[in-house]
Structure formats: C-alpha cells, structure tokens
C-alpha cells in the first residue's frame, strides 16, 4: 500500500473515561474537521445517504462508542475502541500503519473484532480502482451489496479457520475500509460501516 506522508508531530496516548484515544496535533489532520460524535444507531448501509459526503482524514476512534458498535454488530456489549495512526503498529499485528484506524472487540463467548481505517492522504480514482481490483482477487468472494464508495468493493475472505468481510471504497477523495472478523454477513458489516462513516463525517 502506498506510504502516507505524515508530518512529524508530538503525539501521546491518553486514557479518557476508560477509553484509549489518540491525542494528536492539528497538523496530523488532513481534510475538513469531523462533526460532533453521533449517537448509537443500527442503520443499514443501503438506507444511509452517502451522496456528496465528505470525510475527515484524521483520528476518529474517539468518536465511536462501545454502545454504537455493539448495536450495529447485533451483540450485547463491546469493549472500548483502540486507535492507531500512521507510523504506529496496528494492534495485534507487526504491521506499521499508513492509515488512521480503529478496532473494537465485541460479543460474549463468540468474540468478533470490528475495525476500520482511513488512508491519511487524498486518493485519486485511478489508484482507488486499482485497489478495488486487487482486493477482489485470490480466495476472496465478492458480495453483491451496496458499497461505501465509488469505486468500491465488498469481499468475504478466508482468515485462517475463519473468515472476515471487508468493505473498501473511495468517498470523495478519501479511501475508507471497514471490516468485521468471523462473519460473511455483509449487511451486518455494513451497519458497522455506517457507524464509522458517521464518526468520519465532515459535512
């Protein structure tokens, strides 16, 4: 994936009300500022108006509540989200991120992980089309459901003994992805995408 060019800034990880949030300098952000944090919802992606939508390319995890994630995923409870930014290791992996991201673990005995990430710099349509093509290759199965952006793609892919379903797409000039592990239910993942879109919404 194309490396993002990120300004060198002073950052710190703060714990606020039991939630891990990334505290950043304004220079870390690109794109317009996000709107105030939305309330919990379980809106299907097909019913969510994305026409002319603008996203803020910056930290958004602090605007997603455990309540919103649990409601969207159809589970009783979720843990507080964990954030990452360009240059940090993605939680649970050895990969260094090029994106602003958020991950949340939900469910009871059958745990699932919902995650989302937004590329830190503007993305043009030619590159987005290339990424959408690459995402649909291999053992992944494309899903015939509404996408989060254009161009965009929705796939369910093997993940060890399990699977995950991922939406990726270009919203304006911002590349966004949202994923839920352990499920091939694209509508369920789409509801999680709506929570993420609301957290990133700048219009």
Image (tube, rainbow, N blue to C red):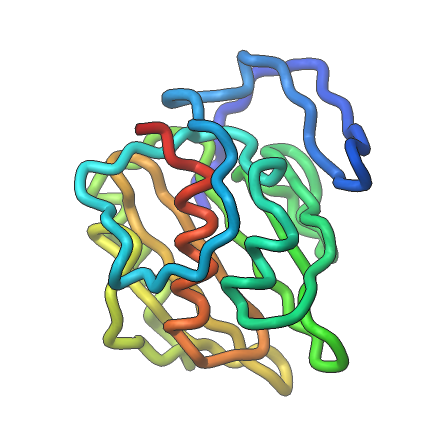
Q: From this view, report whether residue 189 is shown above or below residue 141.
A: above
Query: How far from the left and from the top, in percent, is residue 120?
Result: 46, 32
Q: Is residue 145 left or right of residue 60?
A: left
Q: Is residue 128 left or right of residue 101?
A: left
Q: Residue at x 48, y 31 (%)?
A: 4
Looking at this view, is 62 or 125 the one in front?
A: 62
Query: How far from the left and from the top, in percent, is residue 33?
Result: 43, 21
Q: Residue at x 55, y 13 (%)?
A: 26
| Position of the C terminus by quadrant | top left
Q: Residue at x 32, y 60 (%)?
A: 45
Query: How far from the left and from the top, in percent, is residue 130?
Result: 27, 53
Q: Is residue 128 left or right of residue 33?
A: left
Q: From this view, report whether residue 22 is shown above or below residue 184.
A: above
All told, the count of numbered labels is 0
Q: Is residue 54 left or right of residue 117?
A: left
Identity of the residue furthest to the bottom in this view: 161
Query: How far from the left and from the top, in percent, is residue 100?
Result: 55, 37
Q: Residue at x 60, y 42 (%)?
A: 97
Q: From this view, report whether residue 109 is shown above or below residue 53.
A: below
């Amino acid at each position: 994936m194309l490396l993002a060019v990120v300004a060198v800034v002073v950052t710190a990880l703060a714990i606020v009300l039991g939630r891990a949030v990334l505290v950043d300098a304004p220079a870390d952000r690109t794109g317009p500022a996000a709107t105030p944090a939305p309330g919990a919802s379980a809106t299907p992606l097909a019913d969510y108006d994305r026409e002319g939508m603008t996203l803020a390319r910056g930290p958004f995890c602090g605007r997603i509540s455990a309540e919103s994630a649990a409601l969207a995923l159809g589970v009783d409870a979720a843990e507080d989200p964990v954030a990452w930014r360009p240059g940090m290791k993605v939680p649970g992996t050895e990969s260094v991120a090029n994106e602003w991201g958020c991950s949340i673990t939900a469910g009871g005995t059958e745990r699932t992980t919902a995650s989302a990430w937004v590329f830190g710099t503007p993305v043009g349509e030619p590159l987005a089309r290339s990424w959408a093509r690459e995402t649909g290759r291999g053992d992944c199965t494309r899903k015939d459901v509404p996408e989060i952006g254009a161009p965009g793609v929705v796939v369910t892919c093997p993940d060890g003994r399990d699977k995950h379903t991922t939406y990726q797409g270009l919203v304006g000039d911002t590349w966004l992805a949202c994923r839920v592990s352990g499920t091939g239910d694209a509508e369920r993942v789409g509801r999680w995408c709506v929570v993420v879109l609301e957290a990133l919404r700048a219009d």
